[in-house]
Each structure stands twice: as structure tokens, then as C-alpha cells.
């Protein structure tokens, strides 16, 4: 008996979302994967959540500038003066946010990253203090609302554009780091683009949380 060949329907393969992720930024949808970020936070602190929460609650907003002195300097969450942002930058570097030594970093080029990273880390403290629910919808909505204050919109996106000379040579990585026309910052609050928030800032936050978990007791 001869059977007729049957036509098979090929189901197109849907590319994995991971193929389009730059950190937590989806380059296909041009949006941040907030749920993925929250899940990674949960995984990162699972081993010693209380240690992380304790450190952030007591030590994030102050820093020991002089190792030989027990005195600690307060760090303001809202102050964007150079002196305070320098403390923000030092704090996140103490938490291992960058492989580049602080002395080798360009303060003005890193300024917006420092402010946004420090503030984003502070924003996750209440999340760590709560129980992670089965559904992340509420946490995503709450975190997104808070982080929006650090994301550029509309014309603000120009703050983070490259500065080139007439020959196309890069002068400044970011327009908001170019202070040639004056000492006033055009991006006073240190906002970053949505892509930078997902691709740079949020991965930094997860990295710092992991570092707090695995550091020795002397670290805290």
C-alpha cells in the first residue's frame, strides 16, 4: 500500500530574547527587562539577603574617606555638587563597580553614571526589605516609576551624545561631560538614556550586590 506523503508544517523558530539583550536592555523592543533585573537581584542576594540589606541600610549613605580615621562622611542622595558626587563615585567603586582604579577614571565622563548608579542602588533597598512575590508586576511598576527620574527623555537624550570635532574626531564621550563653554552642568541630575540604564547601570547594581554577599566580614 502506497501512502501519500503528508505536508509538514514548519513552525518558525522564535529567537531567544537573550540574543537581543545588552545587559537588561532589549535592543529589539528598545525597552528594559525590569523583571529580569528583579529576578537577578533575588538570585544575587539569596545566599545572605540580611547581610546585603544590613550593609545598604547602614553604610550606603556614608563613607570612610580616611582609612586611619573611624569618622565617616555622609553621602547625600540628592546633592549633585562635585564634592558629593565624588563620594558617590568612591562608594560605588569601593563596592567593585568598575575594574578601572578610581584615580584613572575621568570624573566628568563618569559623573552621570556615578549619580545614576548610586541612586539606582539606593532604590533597590526597599525591594530587598520586602518579600519577593510570585508576580513581579507591582515591583516592576514601582521600580520603573522610580528609575524614570534618572532616564533622559526627548531633548535630554542629547546630553549623552558624543562630541566630535569638525574632522569627526571624538572629543568627549558624552556631551554632558564637555564643560568648555562653562562650569555649569547641562545634565545636573546625572540622567542616562534608557539604553544606558539597562545596559550599564542596572548590571552594575547587580554586580555590587553580589560583591557585598561574597566579601569578607571586614568589608562591612
Image (tube, grey):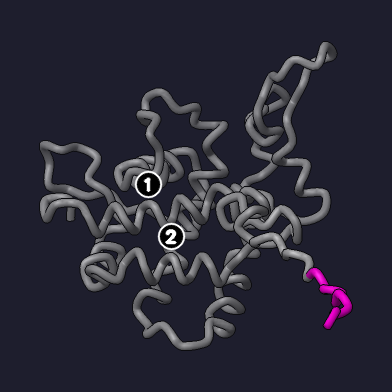
Quarter assignment of residue 98 = top left
Residue 106 or 136: which is nearer the viewer?
136
Mark 2 element type: helix
Mark 1 element type: helix
Q: Residues within 10 Å of mark 1 (few under 14, many from 20)?
A: many
Q: Is residue 208 left or right of residue 106?
A: left
Q: Which residues are magenta?
A: 1-10
Q: Which mark is residue 133?
A: none
- The quarter of the picture where the C terminus appears is bottom left
Residue 125 or 135: which is nearer the viewer?
135
Residue 118 or 47: which is nearer the viewer?
47
Residue 40 in the image: state x and y as whole percent: 44, 65
Residue 80 in the image: state x and y as whole percent: 52, 48
Q: Which mark is residue 121?
A: 2
Q: Are marks 1 and 2 in contact (CB under 8 Å)?
A: yes
Residue annotated with mark 1: 92
Q: How many numbered marks appear?
A: 2
Q: Residue at x 64, y 53 (%)?
A: 19
- Lower position in the chain sequence, tag 1 or tag 2: 1
Which residue is outermost to the bottom? 134
Which residue is outermost to the top? 167
Q: In this rendering, does residue 111 appear at all?
A: yes
- Residue 131's place in the image compared with 88, above or below, is below
Q: Is residue 5 left or right of residue 190?
A: right
Quarter assignment of residue 97 = top left
- The quarter of the picture where the N terminus appears is bottom right
Q: Is residue 173 left or right of residue 126?
A: right
Q: In this rendering, does residue 189 appear at all?
A: no
Q: CA distance from mark 1 to mark 2?
A: 9 Å
Amino acid at each position: 500500500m502506497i501512502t501519500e506523503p503528508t505536508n509538514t508544517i514548519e513552525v518558525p523558530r522564535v529567537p531567544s530574547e537573550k540574543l537581543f539583550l545588552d545587559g537588561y536592555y532589549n535592543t529589539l523592543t528598545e525597552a528594559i527587562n525590569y523583571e529580569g533585573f528583579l529576578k537577578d537581584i533575588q538570585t544575587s542576594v539569596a545566599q545572605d539577603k540580611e547581610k546585603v540589606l544590613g550593609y545598604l541600610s547602614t553604610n550606603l549613605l556614608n563613607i570612610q574617606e580616611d582609612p586611619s580615621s573611624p569618622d565617616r562622611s555622609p553621602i547625600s542622595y540628592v546633592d549633585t555638587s562635585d564634592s558629593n558626587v565624588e563620594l558617590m563615585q568612591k562608594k560605588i567603586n569601593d563596592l567593585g563597580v568598575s575594574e578601572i582604579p578610581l584615580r584613572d577614571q575621568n570624573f566628568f565622563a563618569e559623573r552621570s553614571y556615578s549619580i545614576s548608579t548610586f541612586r539606582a542602588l539606593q532604590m533597590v533597598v526597599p525591594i530587598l526589605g520586602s518579600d519577593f512575590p510570585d508576580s513581579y508586576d507591582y515591583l516592576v511598576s514601582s521600580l520603573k516609576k522610580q528609575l524614570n527620574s534618572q532616564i533622559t527623555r526627548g531633548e535630554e537624550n542629547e546630553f549623552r551624545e558624543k562630541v566630535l570635532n569638525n574632522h569627526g574626531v571624538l572629543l568627549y564621550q558624552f556631551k554632558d561631560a564637555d564643560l568648555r563653554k562653562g562650569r555649569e552642568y547641562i545634565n545636573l541630575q546625572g540622567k542616562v538614556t534608557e539604553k544606558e540604564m539597562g545596559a550599564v547601570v542596572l548590571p552594575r547594581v547587580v554586580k555590587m550586590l553580589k560583591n557585598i554577599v561574597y566579601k569578607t566580614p571586614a568589608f562591612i
